[in-house]
Amino acid sequence: MDKSSQFNCITIEPGYTKKQYWKDIYLYRDLFFFLAWRDILVRYKQTSIGVIWALLQPLFTVTIFTFVFSKIANLPSGDTPYCIIVLCGLLPWQFFANGFSESSNSLITNANLITKVYFPRIIIPLSSIFVFFVDFLIATSILFGLMLFYHITPNLNILFFPLFLFMLFIFTASAGLLIGSLNVKFRDFRYIIPFITQLGLYVSPVGYSTLAIPDKWKILYYLNPMAGIIDGFRWAILGEISLYLPGVLCSIAIITLFFSFSLLYFRKVEKNFADII
C-alpha cells in the first residue's frame, strides 16, 4: 500500500480554498481552540495576580464613572443604582474594545504561522477574541454581586440576553476582521485602533444611560451599534430599563451589513496575507 494513502492530505490547487473554506474552518477547529487556549494562558500566567485583573479593571472604572457621571454631572438613571447602570454598559464595551484591539493586530503577531502552513486565516482573529469572553464571564460576577446587594432580580427579559451577546461578538468580529486585514497591508491602521476605542468609549452609552439622549437625536445616536447592544444588555439584565426598539433594530441592521462587508473583504484579501506580511 502506498504510504501516502495512510494519511489524510489536503492538496492546495486553484479554486480549492474557495470551495472548501467553510468546511476547513470546521476541520481546523482544534487549531482555533489551541490558539484561544494559548492566549488565555499567556494572558493569565504572566501576571502576578492572574484573573484578579479581570475584576479590578471594571471595578475601578465603575467607581470613577459613577462618581463623575452621577455625582458631578448628575445624569439620570431612573430607579436603578447608577453603579449597576455603568457596569451593564462597561462589560460589553470592554469586551468589544479589548477584542477589537487584539483581533486587529492578531494577523501581524501570528505572521510566522501564516507564512508557514495553510489554514483558514479567519481562525486567528476569531480565536483572539475568545480570551476576552473569559474576562467577560469573570467580570460578570461583580455585576451579579451588586444586583444581589441591591435586591435586583432579572425578569423574563433575560431570555434575550444571548441575542445581545451574539450581536456583541459579531460586531467585535466584524471590526477585527476589517481592521485586521487592512493592518496587514497598511500598518498605519495600528495607530487608528487606540483612537477608535478611546472615542467609542464616550460616544457609546457606557458611563450614562440613553435616557440622557434627546429624542430628536436618538436614531442618529443608534447608528453606533454599541448603543443598541449596551441598551439591550441593560434591558435584558435589569428588566426595568426601557428599550428603544427602533434604535436596537437600527443597530442590528448596521451590524448585519458591517459583518457582511467585513467578511467579504477579508475573504478577498486573505489569499495575499502570506506574501505581504
Image (cartoon, rainbow, N blue to C red):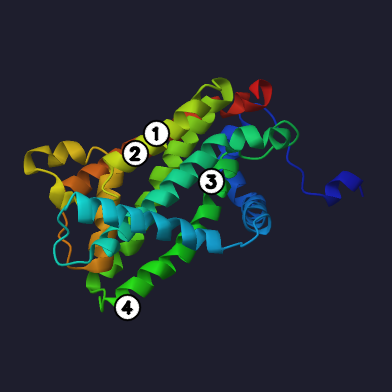
Callout 4: 10 Å neighbours few (<14), some, many (20+)?
Answer: few
In the rendered structure, which amino acid carries the disc numbered 1? Ile
Callout 3: 10 Å neighbours few (<14), some, many (20+)?
Answer: many
**Whole-number angstrom distance, CA of label 4 to CA of label 2:** 30 Å
Mark 2 secondary-structure assignment: helix
Residue 21, placed above or below residue 244? above
Residue 144 located left or right of residue 269? left
Residue 190, placed above or below residue 246? above
Residue at 39% in and 33% down:
196
Q: Nearer the viewer's eye, disc 3 or disc 2? A: 2
Q: Earlier in the sequence, mark 3 or mark 4?
A: 3
On the question of residue 221 being in view, the answer is yes
**Whole-number angstrom distance, CA of label 1 to CA of label 4:** 34 Å
Judging by the rendered image, the residue that carries numbered circle 3 is 126
Task: Give percent across and percent down for residue 58.
Answer: 42, 57
Judging by the rendered image, the residue that carries numbered circle 2 is 200
Residue 61 located left or right of residue 211? right
Residue 106 located left or right of residue 158? right
In the rendered structure, which amino acid carries the disc numbered 2? Gly
Residue at 61% in and 29% down:
15
Residue 93, placed above or below residue 52? above
Judging by the rendered image, the residue that carries numbered circle 1 is 196
Task: Give percent across and percent down for residue 191.
Answer: 49, 27
Task: Give percent across and percent down for residue 209.
Answer: 20, 53
Q: Are marks 1 and 2 in contact (CB under 8 Å)?
A: yes
Judging by the rendered image, the residue that carries numbered circle 4 is 148
Residue at 57% in and 49% down:
127
Task: Give percent across and percent down for residue 101.
Answer: 50, 39
Q: Earlier in the sequence, mark 3 or mark 2?
A: 3
Instruction: Farthest residue to the front: give it.
Output: 72
Q: Are marks 3 and 2 in contact (CB under 8 Å)?
A: no
Q: Earlier in the sequence, mark 3 or mark 1?
A: 3
